[in-house]
Image (cartoon, rainbow, N blue to C red):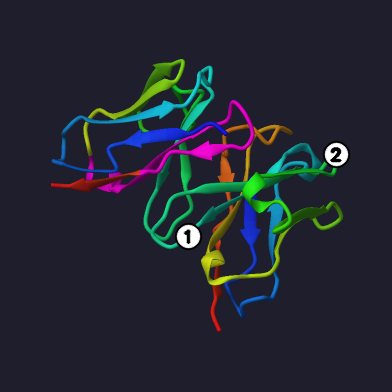
Amino acid sequence: DIQMTQSPSSLSASVGDRVTITCQASQDISNYLNWYQQKPGKAPELLIYDSSKLETGVPSRFSGSGSGPDYTFTISSLQPEDIATYYCQQYDKLPLTFGGGTRVEIK
Amino acid sequence: QVQLVQSGAEVKKPGSSVTVSCKASGGTFSSYAINWVRQAPGQGLEWMGGLIPAFRTARYAQKYQGKITISADHVTSTAYIELKSLRSEDTAVYYCARGGNVDMATPFTHWGQGTPIIVSS
């Protein structure tokens, strides 16, 4: 199974700050990497797919990059509505696997 | 407009079984794989398995082999997951999720609302 190591597990930042989350796969996943946002009590929502493509309707302050086993998710200017837990997920091979999640809070 | 609507919360006794349903609307049911994702209380997301309705082919994470059965009813456009021999550790929210093509390995663009299953004596 492909292991996904996501960091940090939590972070606190101010409104307007740039926020970065990293995700490292245990092997090359060829950009088959998604990022999801999950708010408390809600189902996850897809933000980024194929490591850097923005899902329709997602604000442009969200972005993704990376290659091989290493990927980054960025919120360019943190907004109050971005408070949530973010997960990376690889879909290069079954079983599909998720990172452990990053809880983002407002300082 | 694609929608996945899941069955409601359940409280079950240890050792029993439970079946969660996921009714799809919008789009052709057989054309898209349905996946099931588990989230234990305060924990992250875990893929359990998926089904390609067109091929009636299910794949399971090794951890869940023998524990779950995923199936689908094409007439009602509904997918199911049966969990057997329930234990307290199976207490979780169970989500169905679908992507944009027939492959299980695809971004999950649509999710059900989640079904809480509580296992307690």
Q: Position of residue B38 (x, y in %)?
A: 55, 54
Labels in figure, total: 2
Where B21 falls versus A74 (above or below)?
Answer: below
Q: Position of residue A57 (x, y in %)?
A: 45, 34
Q: Is residue A84 magenta?
A: yes
Where B14 falls versus B42 (above or below)?
Answer: below
> Which one is earlier in the sequence, the residue at label 1 or at label 2?
1
Name the secondary structure under disc 1: loop
Q: Is residue A100 magenta?
A: yes
Can you identify the residue that label 1 sits on? B40
Q: Which mark is residue A89?
A: none
Q: What type is the residue that disc 2 sits on?
A: Phe
Q: What type is the residue that disc 1 sits on?
A: Ala
Which class describes the residues within 10 Å of circle 2: few (<14), some (14-19), or many (20+)? few
Where B66 falls versus B54 (above or below)?
Answer: below
Q: In the rendered view, does A54 fall on the left or right side of B34?
A: left
Name the subunit of mark 1: B
Residue plotted at (16% across, 33% down): A17
Q: In the rendered view, does B76 fall on the left or right side of A96?
A: right
Name the secondary structure under disc 2: loop
Q: In the rendered view, does A2 fall on the left or right side of B27?
A: left
Q: Position of residue B26 (x, y in %)?
A: 70, 46
Which class describes the residues within 10 Å of circle 1: few (<14), some (14-19), or many (20+)? some
Write down the region rendered in magenta. A79-101
Where B90 falls versus A15 (above or below)?
Answer: below
Can you identify the residue that label 2 sits on? B55
